[in-house]
């Protein structure tokens, strides 16, 4: 439905744009109807930039994004508006998505003005109520309220309800639950998951793997703007191949498993013997992740993280020094890993 | 006992009346203990944390007493608190990223801070550099402006500065919320390391993310609408919570491996009551699936098992309803 083909984004930085910063490099994937695609990466991985390019908030430097066969970069005027009828986004901070001066339900009025000027007020009101109910909100609770009177979860759901009023096919959800309370988070997640039953394609952008795993069919792991691992969610989670995916998995705080314990399976998976920990640290401080530095001293754990960190360092060095992006290799059906850094 | 809080009540003065954000709160933190403080937004957890360090002008202490290492902490007296702040009680604020002065280099800022407390920057410098290195940063961050540091770096710099004078109590307010998972882990482990190295005697970690507390905290205190709901060791709160609120809060967390198709989690419907005129009785009553008649009275916060306190009529001996509506 929505297809990204070798999409690259280079930001110009520095005085007079003299330096260039590649934020996204040759990323290709597809958002399919009825599927949640989780795009996972940390700050600076280019995940939000991808979301913005799909929503045409940022132009693409090279490559193409096509929707139903048309390149979205060429859309203008009426056709662009039609595009937004089908593709909408919801962002991280619900409080800054609204104008606090107006009531929150103004977002519905603006939709009506631009897309449905001929619909009668009574019918519109009915549609708004149906849409609110479909996202699990009681219209009486949220209509005619100002943003400060509503909770973060309610505000996010209003934005989703707004998108649903249009004939949307693709929803870009950029970290939409990181600012809402734990108690309502899961409701918004369930809602997203229910949307796919309506045939929507959802791009769920997050840094938290457990959330991605909870709702997505497909997972894409992004590191420094490059896809390092991609495939069916269950395959990526049950059989992570890339060091970065593994590291993200061990770092997720879990209720019933301490961080330390998280490394034991890693040790076993890499065939590392528990007695093998006499190796001195060889960290290159500047280029490694803070995590690796933190653990330079910690005995046996050091070794496992050391291996991960080294693998990660290899990838990072490769990505920094090479213009071209290493190709993805299919290691099993619907499970791709970046080539140069495959674990053997 | 490093910290003893006894029947503390804190409120915000507003034109419409007092908002009691912390209402009759009693707890202790032992030496070397990391206590997690959990709850939704608007439960008073940040108010409690801020109140122990600095009350802003809207805040008033209505009742109660706070003792740190056997000495009373004059939390309502802005001037008297000056001698405690930074030296014996220190905070890493919610937005540590904006806690640094943007117009000063980090080192300059620290030197001004030390001078204001009567310490000498030069003699503290070796220790400062050692700690900066300990958290995985280069010593030259001291020569940089905050704008040159990333979010995670700033967070760690603030933590080092806050604990430089080895305070007895460190309050870490949502220190991991704005960070990536791997930086979250690094910061979480820093909290443990600072405790182990005795940079701080005890720590209070405020967060809405219970899974972080599962990693770092020894005990967990759950607050709801300004009141204490449950307190026990981290293990007990996570594996066998007794308060319905804690149970729902924990069951709503997605864990790695849980998938929506197989196991749909549910949130807690509704939101905490406004604290301007809080409802009488148990404040969780409206959202609680187990509420019964007795809940119209306020449940006492009492110990039901050794080291496990809870404020719920279901758990108070002899008060369970005839039908026996047993949660879980």
Image: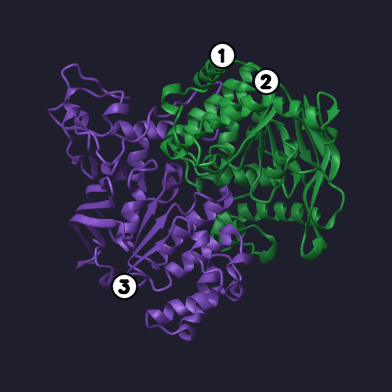
- B56 shown above or below A189: below
Mark 2 on the same chain as mark 1: yes
Front disc: 2 or 1: 1
Front disc: 3 or 2: 2
Q: Which residue in the protein does label 2 denote?
A: A167
**B188 vs B159, nearest the viewer:** B159
Question: Which residue is rendered at x = 61% and y = 30% of the image?
Answer: A110
- How many other residues sit within 10 Å of disc 3, few (<14), some (14-19) or many (≥20)? some
- How many other residues sit within 10 Å of disc 2, few (<14), some (14-19) or many (≥20)? some
- The answer to which quarter of the image holds residue A220 is top right
Mark 3 on the same chain as mark 2: no
Q: Secondary structure at mark 2?
A: loop
Quarter of the image that includes the C terminus of chain B: top left
What colour has chain B? purple
Q: Secondary structure at mark 3?
A: loop
State the separation of the CA atoms marked 1 and 3. 62 Å
Q: Residue furthest left?
A: B318
Q: Which residue in the protein does label 3 denote?
A: B82
Q: Secondary structure at mark 1?
A: helix
CB atoms at circles 3 and 2 under 8 Å apart? no
């Amino acid at each position: 439905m929505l297809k990204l083909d070798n999409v690259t984004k280079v930001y110009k930085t520095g005085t007079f744009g003299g330096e260039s910063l590649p934020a996204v490099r040759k990323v290709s994937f597809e958002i399919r109807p009825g599927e949640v695609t989780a795009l996972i990466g940390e700050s600076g991985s280019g995940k939000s930039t991808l979301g913005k390019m799909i929503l045409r908030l940022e132009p693409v430097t090279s490559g193409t994004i096509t929707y139903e066969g048309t390149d979205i970069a060429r859309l203008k005027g009426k056709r662009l508006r039609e595009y937004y009828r089908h593709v909408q986004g919801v962002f991280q901070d619900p409080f800054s998505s609204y104008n606090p001066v107006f009531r929150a339900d103004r977002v519905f009025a603006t939709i009506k003005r631009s897309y449905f000027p001929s619909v009668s007020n009574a019918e519109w009101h009915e549609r708004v109520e149906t849409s609110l109910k479909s996202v699990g909100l009681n219209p009486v609770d949220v209509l005619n309220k100002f943003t400060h009177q509503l909770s973060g979860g309610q505000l996010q759901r209003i934005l989703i309800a707004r998108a649903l009023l249009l004939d949307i096919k693709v929803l870009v959800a950029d970290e939409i639950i990181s600012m809402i309370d734990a108690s309502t988070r899961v409701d918004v997640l369930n809602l997203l998951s229910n949307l796919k039953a309506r045939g929507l394609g959802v791009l769920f952008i997050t840094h938290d793997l457990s959330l991605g795993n909870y709702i997505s069919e497909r997972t894409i792991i992004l590191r420094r703007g490059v896809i390092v691992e991609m495939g069916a969610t269950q395959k990526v989670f049950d059989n992570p191949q890339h060091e970065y995916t593994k590291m993200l998995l061990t770092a997720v705080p879990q209720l019933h498993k301490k961080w330390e314990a998280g490394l034991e399976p890693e040790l076993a998976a890499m065939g590392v013997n528990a007695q093998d920990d006499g190796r001195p640290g060889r960290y290159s401080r500047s280029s490694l992740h803070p995590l690796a530095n933190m653990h330079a001293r910690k005995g046996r754990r050091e070794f496992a993280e050391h291996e991960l960190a080294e693998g990660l360092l290899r990838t990072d060095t490769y990505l920094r020094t090479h213009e071209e992006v290493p190709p993805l290799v299919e290691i099993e059906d619907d499970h791709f890993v970046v080539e140069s850094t495959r674990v053997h | 006992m490093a910290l003893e809080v006894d029947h503390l009540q804190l409120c915000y003065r507003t034109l419409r009346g007092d908002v009691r954000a912390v209402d009759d709160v009693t707890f202790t933190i032992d030496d070397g203990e990391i206590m997690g403080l959990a709850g939704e937004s608007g439960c008073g957890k940040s108010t409690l944390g801020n109140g122990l360090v600095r009350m802003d002008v809207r805040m008033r202490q209505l009742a109660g007493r706070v003792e740190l290492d056997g000495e009373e902490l004059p939390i309502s007296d802005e001037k008297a608190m000056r001698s405690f702040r930074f030296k014996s009680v220190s905070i890493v604020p919610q937005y540590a990223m904006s806690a640094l002065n943007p117009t000063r280099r980090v080192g300059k800022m620290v030197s001004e801070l030390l001078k204001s407390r009567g310490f000498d920057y030069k003699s503290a410098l070796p220790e400062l550099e050692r700690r900066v290195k300990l958290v995985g940063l280069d010593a030259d961050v001291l020569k940089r402006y905050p704008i040159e540091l990333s979010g995670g770096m700033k967070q760690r710099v603030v933590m080092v500065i806050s604990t430089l004078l080895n305070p007895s109590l460190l309050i870490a307010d949502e220190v991991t919320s704005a960070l990536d998972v791997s930086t979250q882990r690094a910061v979480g482990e820093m909290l443990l390391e600072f405790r182990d190295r005795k940079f701080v005697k005890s720590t209070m970690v405020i967060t809405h993310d219970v899974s972080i507390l599962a990693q770092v905290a020894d005990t967990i205190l759950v607050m709801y609408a300004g009141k204490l709901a449950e307190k026990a060791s981290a293990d007990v709160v996570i594996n066998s919570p007794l308060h319905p609120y804690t149970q729902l809060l924990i069951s709503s967390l997605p864990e790695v491996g849980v998938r929506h198709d197989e196991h749909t989690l549910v949130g807690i419907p509704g939101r905490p009551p406004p604290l301007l005129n809080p409802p009488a009785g148990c404040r969780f009553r409206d959202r609680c699936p187990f509420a019964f008649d007795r809940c119209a009275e306020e449940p006492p916060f009492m110990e039901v098992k050794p080291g496990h306190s809870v404020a719920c009529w279901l758990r108070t001996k002899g008060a369970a309803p005839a039908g026996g509506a047993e949660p879980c």
